[in-house]
Image (spheres, rainbow, N blue to C red):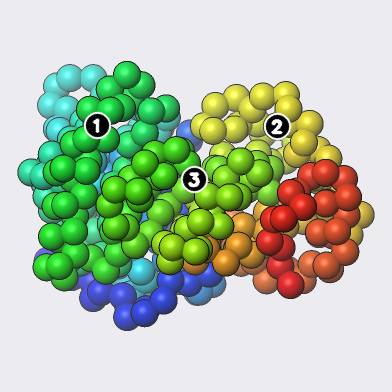
Amino acid sequence: MTLQAEPSVLSELPRFGLGAAGLGNLYSEVSEVEALDALLAARDAGLDLIDTSPFYGHGLSEQRIGDCLAQVSWRPALSTKVGRVLDPAGDGPVPDNGFASPAPFIPRFDYSAGGIRQAFDDSKARLGVDTVDTLLLHDIGRLTHGDAHEKILSQALKEALPEMARMKAEGLTRRIGLGVNEIEVCQEVIDQFDLDILLIAGRYTLLEHKASLTFLDSCHDRGIDVMIGGAFNSGLLVSSENQPLRYDYDTAPEWAIEKTARLREVCARFNAPLPAAALQFCAAHPAVRTVLAGARARSEVHQIADWTGKKIVPDLWDALRDAGLIAENAPVPA
């Protein structure tokens, strides 16, 4: 019998959390043992927020989190997403969508009210919970849907988000919002619908933040919380030799590789690991409540914990400004 995990008792979101796309075999396979070990390390390190999605490994990430919570006494804040329904693949081929050996399901976009309910019911079953702390509408926006964007946005505003608001009123979640990689669609939605939170991946980072800084400032003024995902820009800011250099889930462009090298050189002068500076920079903006860092092994969780607590001298931020690597008006850690 699967035990039901109790809801999180956290009243505020923690400063740092665990992004669980890697636990769904993003790019390469993670064993069940490794996934459980990474989650237990996150518990021990105080990373008491886990962000996942049905899309991650086609349900595999959520299932692994649910298996962990059924075995241990731990009540992290859970964030998951709606907007895709997982259809059994049957005897048909399973698209990988960037995940190695995903579960045998085929993700299908569904932003209807019924699709939102179905996706959440399925997520609850995989996670073994009755409620989650944060529920996000996943991957709306022009970059994702192209010419269908206006139609998708209309359905999100008329069906998906109102259904999520009803679910919040029913006590199924504390916060509703968007989980996207695009600033533009966030602006389009918050101008028409009240949201509690936005998960923005890869757009406000040490590498790339100038274009989104004004938007985050406006979120702070309006009382909309922000979670930052992709703080390492698909791993580029934490990459080492002989690793693939990725940006936005694809091969990193030359400008990003060159800027990362410049960031690493300045950080090295102040004995600051670039990943530590990346995480702490994102957390410094007053609109940001949580910065998510992805990990797929116990050793990576330990690294993240070390980076979040690393003392960085203020002179580093001055040097990065002087080099033109961060915006003049970007908030930095005190």
The label number, if any, that marks residue 201 in the structure image: 3
What label does residue 256 carry, if any? Answer: 2
Residue 165 in view (yes/no): yes
Relative to 250, is 276 on the left or the right? right
Real-space CA distance between mark 3 and mark 1, rounded to the nearest whole angstrom: 20 Å
Left of 281 or right of it: where is 223? left
**Residue type, label 2:** Ala
Q: Foreground: 51 or 159?
A: 159
Which residue position holds label 1? Answer: 152
The residue under the point 24% across, 31% down is: 152
Residue 231 seen in the figure? no
Q: Where the C terminus falls, by quadrant? A: bottom right
Q: Residue at x 13, y 60 (%)?
A: 166
Residue 203 position in % (x across, y down): 55, 43
Residue 115: name its quadrant.
Answer: top left
Indicate which disc, 1 or 2, sits on the residue closer to the N terminus: 1
Q: How far apart are marks 1 and 2 (CA)?
A: 31 Å
Closer to the camera, 131 or 170? 170
